[in-house]
Image (cartoon, rainbow, N blue to C red):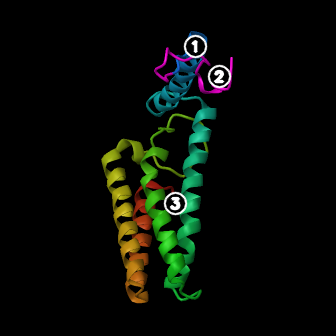
Amino acid sequence: MGPYLNKGLSHKRYAGRGKYRTNSKETGLMNRGKLIVLGALLAVAGAAGAQMSDEQAERAVETRQSLLQVMVWNYGPMGAMARGRIDFDTDRVKTNAERLVALSKMMSDAFAADTRSNDVDTEALDVIWEQPDDFAAKIEATIEASNALVAAAATGDEGVMTQAIGRVGSTCGSCHDDFRLDD
């Protein structure tokens, strides 16, 4: 066979043209692999809109809770800086603000799976899926506030960053007020 087998190519060349032909068995295996991956992706995507098992719902809840925990892990130090509890670190604000932008953009995907009808432990209120446009607006506000924090961090001005940190915190709190079970 030759060294090209691992790349889905046979060792034989088309006459003088420098192109490799694929082995039909190898091509079939590659296509079968692509179909399996495609099927798995469709199954996951379908779970967001279809009834899911409690095990699937539990994984969905764990995913969104993990995302939110990473957001807290990034926001927490900035909130402490804004309150004067720890020394201000502009580089850390820049890094964490950029992370918040990326994480905030994942929220709509993390909450796509409607787990209302499943027996799972969650603080997410049903209104998330009953009023998806309102929830999406809260996510968008968080993304915008996080982007504004990135811009504020670029100025290096503590006062500007402190205000922007407060706006991010307000968007988080607003979402919690409307869409999260009170502790």
Q: Which of the image's four quarters has the N terminus?
A: top right
Disc number placed over residue 23 in the picture, else none: 1
Query: 10 Å neighbourhood of mark 2: few (<14), some, or many (≥20)?
Result: few
Distance Cα–Cα, label 2 vs label 3: 59 Å
Three-letter amino acid code of the residue under disc 2: Leu
For label 2, the residue is 5
Q: Identify the residue at horizontal 35%, vertical 51% (top origin).
A: 136
Which mark's residue is nearer the viewer, 3 or 1?
A: 1
Q: Which residue is mark 3?
A: 182
Instruction: State the CA–CA distance, disc 2 to disc 1.
Output: 9 Å
For marks 3 and 1 on the same chain, the one whose residue lies earlier in the sequence? 1
Q: Is residue 49 magenta?
A: no
Crowd tier of the residue under label 3, counting other residues whose Cα lies within 10 Å: few below 14, some 14–19, many 20 or above: few
Q: Amino acid under label 3?
A: Asp
Q: Is residue 171 above or below residue 163?
A: above
The percent coordinates of residue 163 (x first, y second) are: 38, 81
From which residue to which does the magenta span run? 1-19
